[in-house]
Amino acid sequence: MASVTADLKARERAGELRQLLGKKYRYIDRKWDIMFWVTAAFVVGAAADITKQLFAGDWDFWTDWKDAQWWPIITPFAIIIIPSALQYIQWLAWKFPTGAVYTTVCLWACVEIGRWLHWRYFVYYPINFVWPATAVLAGIWLDWVLLKSKSWVITSTIGAMGWTLIFWASNYVMLAPFLQPVSFMGHTLTLADVQGIEYIRTQTPEYLRLIEQGSLRTFLGETLYVALAFGATVAIAGYWIGQFIGRMLAIWPIGKFAKRV
Amino acid sequence: MRRRLLFALLLGLGLMIFSAPAAFAHGEHSQEPWLRLSTVAFWNTTFSTQTVQQGQELTITGTAKVLEAWPKALPDPETAFINVETPGPAFLVKDRVINGQAAPDSIYIERGGVYNYKLTLVGRVPGTYHVHPTFAVRSAGTLIGPGQTIRVTKSAAGFSNPVQLYNGKTVNLESYGLGWPVMGFSVLTFVLGMVWLLYWIVPKPTVSRLAVTSQLSVNDDGGEAVGLVTRRDHRAMNLIMLAAVLLLAGGWIWQATAFKTKIPQQVNRFRVASAPQAATFATATLNKITYDRKAQTLTMDTQAVNQGKTPMELRSLHFANLTFLPGAASSGATAPGVDGTFEASPSGPVAAGATQTLTLTLRGRTLTTNDLVPTGTANGIMTAVLEFADASNNSNFVTIQQFVTPIFD
């Protein structure tokens, strides 16, 4: 009898919420929605790009930096932070599984504009040398995992690990042509290396290029797989840094200082 | 009052714009004198031409020495990269030969090492540029060699950058892979992301959902009964996820088929031995160096020892990237690669086996214009390289160093 009552109460409450969901507000129309999504796009794109530049600047700029050792470790970690924060905010506020896709799409648009405008038209670097990585497919995965699991723990583990693998796999498709071997200056190099040598990077000596270095190379030559495993693990940490930003720097102050009606 | 203010503002702005000279250098003067003087010295820098057409070659040759006087304040010089300083990729570097060895990447060097370099560039972007050879050393930064203004003219045939692959195919590196996969694949991922976003944003209200979601726990979407996230939403998202997987799989199949042979990016760093030097016949010490700020005169009291069997002469004097030749001070133009003259007293060769005191005097503003006289800095040490030549035309490059004694106004 008690369970039937509880079930009825739950249904009644769900019905009320459904009615509330369909309610037409006099002063809250779609203009507010448009204003939010459009204005936030620039802030989110900039925040994601700044975070990426802070942690993984050069790895995202040059084809000869996109190596099999450091690129899969550093860049996914750097670029999961803001998507994670946005995931928390958008899921909590609207139950939209869109935080990661929104961030990666905004990042994609902002960075593409920047690369074409600043790097191609202002300083003449060919875009096939300075193309930015895309994280949109990884973002779709992350939001999909959240939608299915509704769990931050599962999203941070399964989602973040998959994020790293999908990030690397999707960008490897674009990198592949530049890993073809060529003979240049009497050495066997990749096309990417040739780009790095030929297109002068003023005040950026080659020895600053941090690729294919470190003790990960001792793992039976399987550097890439070790790097991906490590990158997947640090992406979990990056995800929780993003959660901290979303929960403690974005949502918590609102709850603390905003007046609840 | 307002008009006057506006006029003053416009005048100031106009004066600023029209009086500003064009920048034709790369900030070498901003590096502190002790750093530039005591680390790397450049000489014999030559540029094969001052004008190139797009696609035509320009060669820069010269010598750089990692000085024995390398400052203790910096870690030992170990890794270096010889390159050029240009405003962005206005040129392409097609070849880099250091002491006879092709060196695409950085090299390992030694203190006191002498490195003869030859850089082959190709004009790429039409314009007029100031070009310098550079010698970057890890932990010290980029030391900038003598500069030259180079003009790149437009080629009627346009510009391409052909590079031959191992498989025999030639590609234009200016645009290879740009349409597909670089932009094409990237745009496809963006489109898929937009489909995902628009599915949620367009048909569903955003801001007003807060009234409902604020009554649910963070892990609860209310299910089908509430309607925030429906079965239809799940089905649609599954389809987009499937499309993402198919796009990824398709991309991988394409790249694996199209580019069967791939190698990782290469890091080809190796040690380049110092260029062979003539047997030592000259040594020198710098007893005192004074700089008279009012007279703009630098005086160096040196002691030269000729340990050789023939007379030797002081052929040139080098400070960082500047070269001075013996002779009377002249206000006229100097020869290419020469920045000024110095007077040696007594003039003439140093006899075999003799020890001779030489007073070297440099007049004029060349050193101060290049910010190479450290009278107002915390570290007032000056380093120079003297080139002595014997009767057989062998040269010894001797590094001398002393703290400068300024004579204030």
Image (tube, coloured by chain):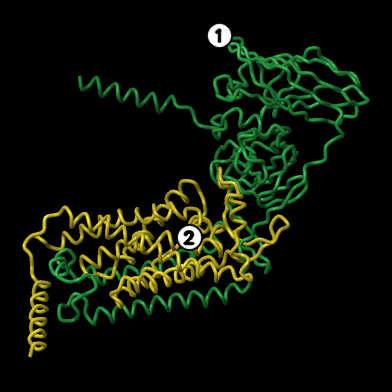
- Residue at x 63%, y 70% (from the top left corner): A221
Q: Position of residue B369 (x, y in %)?
A: 58, 22
Q: Is residue B290 left or right of residue B86?
A: right
Q: Nearer the viewer, residue B131 or B227?
A: B227
Q: Position of residue B171 (x, y in %)?
A: 61, 62
Asked if residue B180 shows in the view, the reply is no
Q: Position of residue B88 (x, y in %)?
A: 54, 44
- Name the quadrant containing residue B261: bottom right
Q: Secondary structure at mark 1?
A: loop
Q: Is residue A198 left or right of residue A228?
A: right
The kind of residue on which mark 1 rests is Asp
How many callouts does the rendering have?
2
- The green-coloured chain is labelled B
**Mark 2 — residue?**
A74
Circle 2 residues within 10 Å: few <14, some 14–19, many ≥20: many
Q: Is residue B254 left or right of residue B213?
A: right
Tint applied to chain A in the drawing: yellow
Q: Nearer the viewer, residue B2 or B341?
A: B341
Circle 1 residues within 10 Å: few <14, some 14–19, many ≥20: few
- Residue at x 54%, y 20% (from the top left corner): B376
- Name the quadrant containing residue B362: top right
In this picture, is B207 found above or below B25?
Answer: below
Residues at circles 2 and 1 in contact by the CB criterion of under 8 Å: no
- Residue at x 19%, y 55% (from the top left corner): A254
In this picture, is B33 found above or below A229?
Answer: above
Asked if residue B15 shows in the view, the reply is yes
- Name the quadrant containing residue A261: bottom left
**Mark 1 — residue?**
B409
> Which chain contains the residue that carries disc 1?
B
Quadrant location of the C terminus of chain B?
top right
